[in-house]
Amino acid sequence: MKLQLTVGLKQTLAPQLIQSLKMLQMPTLKLEQTLRHELAANPMLEEIETLEQEPEEDKASETEKESEELIKDDGPEIDPRLNEIDWDTYLNDDHDYKIEKSFTEPRAEILEQTSATQKTLYDHIREQLHLLKISEEELLIGEYILGNLDPRGFLVVSVPDMAAELKIPPDKIESTLKIMQGLDPVGVCARDLRESLLLQLADKDLQDTLAYRVVNERLYDLEKKSALQVGKMMGVSVEKIQDAMDIIRTLSPTPARGKFDAGAMPVTPDLIVERVGDDFVVLHNDHNLPRMRINPSYRTLLKRKGGGSEDTKQYVREKLEQARWLLNSINQRRDTMVRVMRAIVGEQREFFDKGPAFLRPLIMEDIARIVDMNVATISRVSNGKYVQTPHGVYELKYFFNSGITRDDGVEVSKRNVKAHLAEIIAAEDPVKPLSDQDIFRRLNGEGYKLARRTVTKYREELKILPARFRKRVTG
């Protein structure tokens, strides 16, 4: 092993470019948090409280007055690092660095949305448990069981394992578990899906029905076999099996899910598209972002005081450059997002005029070519960003989708093809449901050139069962 020097060229990303890319990826809420942090960390930045543009004379006099107040003998002591240095290169630019607001604010007032505080499943069941007239031992066992429920409300630890851990007989665990299975929501504290569904049927006094028997004996055959096959296995008619399955469909496979989940966070659109006359205007939604600029008070102070050390100069240079890079990155992010959205509006004009049914095929390469940007940049802009349109709030990725060309030359998006497939199945005769081959022939007859396997793929993506499971038998 030895040490040696080598000379070569290496391409690296400049810090400014890295910061711009990070800003471009951030959604509005994350960006607001980042800007608030930078405001607190960088003394060269300040937030502009008012949106109105102040006259230049008033701004100058106010800054002058503020600076004089700060350098009075009886005023606060100035940090020695903020002594005057040569600011000709850093502060006497022809323009002021600040985050510009969009040229107009959205007409509709944006109200702050807050989600209601919800109980957790643990709290909900624990409250009921403490209201029961049970012994202290049963209460402790109940709380131990409660701590072993998953988010669905199912017990994830076996009774023997709990008995061994608590060093008590398994029958005591079983008796306490039986009590807890009667609590709300119905079906919780079950050991598996079958037990949960049986508890829900028992709560409805359906223990003596065929539905109870199907769940108890043939639950896991339902997803593999048709109603006719299940009926033959159980020795009952297919009509009765279908009625039993209709009852089973009313039960919840996850009794706790959806009731105790964390409330969904409201989506704050990053962009707004509004109709103005016959055209559409794209606005950057910076309503909640702090409006920032280089602090003019520091600028005036640093010009008036005496010389400073090299460390002071370096410190101030770094903070000023960081502030400039940040503000330039934010402005560049806004301009890039608006340009990309304008291109999307131009390509998806029918969507904005008429609605989602008129969404046309569009890929990121098309937009990248229009705005003269890299496809990776378009991907960063569209990832996790939302736009408010006259037809609702959509993720930017919604507007990018592949499609097919019909025989008449009309381009149709994949989403519209899937919607049409769902309409065909919804209108079918349940006694004679359409097979994938039948749907394939019909779509091809209407000019949609799809492969047979593509029809199956679209049906599965729509979570629609095959024909044999959709079939209904009438007496």
Image: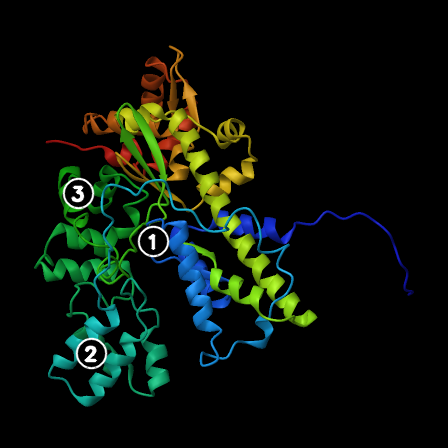
Q: Where is residue 167 in the image (x, y as percent from the top left)?
A: 34, 88
Q: Position of residue 92 (x, y in %)?
A: 58, 53
Q: Position of residue 464 (x, y in %)?
A: 30, 36
- In the picture, the quarter occupied by the N terminus is bottom right
Say above or below: 2 vs 475. below
User: Which amino acid is tagged 2?
Assistant: Ser
Mark 1 and mark 2 lie on one chain; the one further toward the N terminus is 2
Q: Which mark is residue 241?
A: 3
Of 19 and 93, nearer the camera is 93
Mark 3 and mark 2 lie on one chain; the one further toward the N terminus is 2
Q: Which mark is residue 172?
A: none
Of 258 and 359, nearer the camera is 359
Of 49 and 331, nearer the camera is 49
Secondary structure under tag 1 reads loop
Question: Residue at left 22%, top 73%?
Answer: 123
Residue 434 seen by the camera: no
Say above or below: 336 vs 369. below
Mark 3 or 1, which is nearer the eye? 1
Would residue 139 appear left or right of 323 to someone viewing this image? left
Q: Position of residue 86 (x, y in %)?
A: 65, 61
- How many angstroms separate mark 1 from mark 2 (CA)? 55 Å
Would residue 325 appear left or right of 224 to someone viewing this image? right
Q: Which residue is identified by label 2?
A: 175
Question: Residue at left 53%, top 40%?
Answer: 377
Q: Which residue is identified by label 1?
A: 288
Characterize the local packing of mark 2: few (<14), some (14-19) or many (20 or more) Cα atoms within 10 angstroms. Answer: few
- In the picture, the quarter occupied by the C terminus is top left
Colour convention: rainbow
- How many angstroms separate mark 3 from mark 2 (CA)? 33 Å
User: Which amino acid is tagged 3?
Assistant: Ile
